Image (spheres, rainbow, N blue to C red):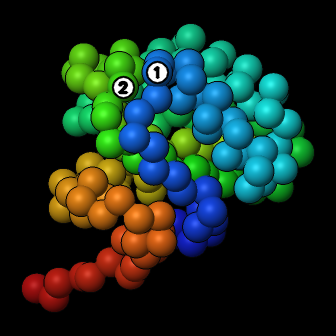
């Protein structure tokens, strides 16, 4: 699984600020609707329902909201970078500014878990997160996420 399979360049947005976590979830649903032709209302509801199970703010200013939706053939994603972080009920109680959302088919099993693992593993890398935060351009952000990982020889 690779980011180029999950993310369209047009599914990356940079906002100066959002008023709340709920507003952010609505914005993610709007991106999903525009880029992946999902149903806006169902996407908002699925994201809110998932957050009710437990917040997806994983710490370090990062959130990974996700939802299972009808009418998707494979897992897709959206990225929002905020210039001004928003409260997100994160596990470390810190506001978030890097939000990567995944949308999976209702029937997705392993594919959804692999995508979540890829995003989580990537966003645990401080160097990647630092690059994302210092490059507020959607095209550059897409390149950062889709560039091949350099493997160092032993």
Does residue 81 show up?
yes
Q: Residue furthest left?
A: 154
Instruction: Give the camera-side residue of 116 and 139.
Output: 139
Instruction: Give the camera-side residue of 138 and 114.
Output: 138
Q: Is residue 33 above or below residue 42?
A: below
Pointer 2 residue:
86
Does residue 72 show up?
no
Quarter of the image that includes the N terminus? bottom right
Q: Is residue 114 left or right of residue 90?
A: right
Name the residue located 24 percent from the left edge and 82 percent from the top edge. Answer: 151
Q: Residue furthest front?
A: 16
Label number found at residue 97: none
Q: Residue furthest top?
A: 52
Name the residue located 59 percent from the left edge and 44 percent from the top edge. Answer: 102
Crowd rating for badge 1 (residues with CA inside 10 Å; few <14, some 14–19, many 20+) = few
Name the residue located 30 percent from the left edge and 64 percent from the top edge. Answer: 135
Q: Is residue 117 left or right of residue 124?
A: right
Pointer 1 residue:
19
Q: Residue furthest bottom?
A: 153
Residue 101: x and y in percent read 55, 42
For label 1, the SS is loop
Contact, CB < 8 Å: mark 2 with mark 1?
yes
Instruction: Give the camera-side residue of 40 and 102.
Output: 40
Residue 121: x and y in percent read 34, 53
Q: CA distance from mark 2 to mark 1?
A: 7 Å
Corner quadrant of residue 4 = bottom right
Give the mark nearest the N terminus, 2 or 1: 1
For label 2, the SS is strand
Residue 52: x and y in percent read 56, 11
Name the residue located 63 percent from the left edge and 18 percent from the top edge. Answer: 48
């Amino acid at each position: 699984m690779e980011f180029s399979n999950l993310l369209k360049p047009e599914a990356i947005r940079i906002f100066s600020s959002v008023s709340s976590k709920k507003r952010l979830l609505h914005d993610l649903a709007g991106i999903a609707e525009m880029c992946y032709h999902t149903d806006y209302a169902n996407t908002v509801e699925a994201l809110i329902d998932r957050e009710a199970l437990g917040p997806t703010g994983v710490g370090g200013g990062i959130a990974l909201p996700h939802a299972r939706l009808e009418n998707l053939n494979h897992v897709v994603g959206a990225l929002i970078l905020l210039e001004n972080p928003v409260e997100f009920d994160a596990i470390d109680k810190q506001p978030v500014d890097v939000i990567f959302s995944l949308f999976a088919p209702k029937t997705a099993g392993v594919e959804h878990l692999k995508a979540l693992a890829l995003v989580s593993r990537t966003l645990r890398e401080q160097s990647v997160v630092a690059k994302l935060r210092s490059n507020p351009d959607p095209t550059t952000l897409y390149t950062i996420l889709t560039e091949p990982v350099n493997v160092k020889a032993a």
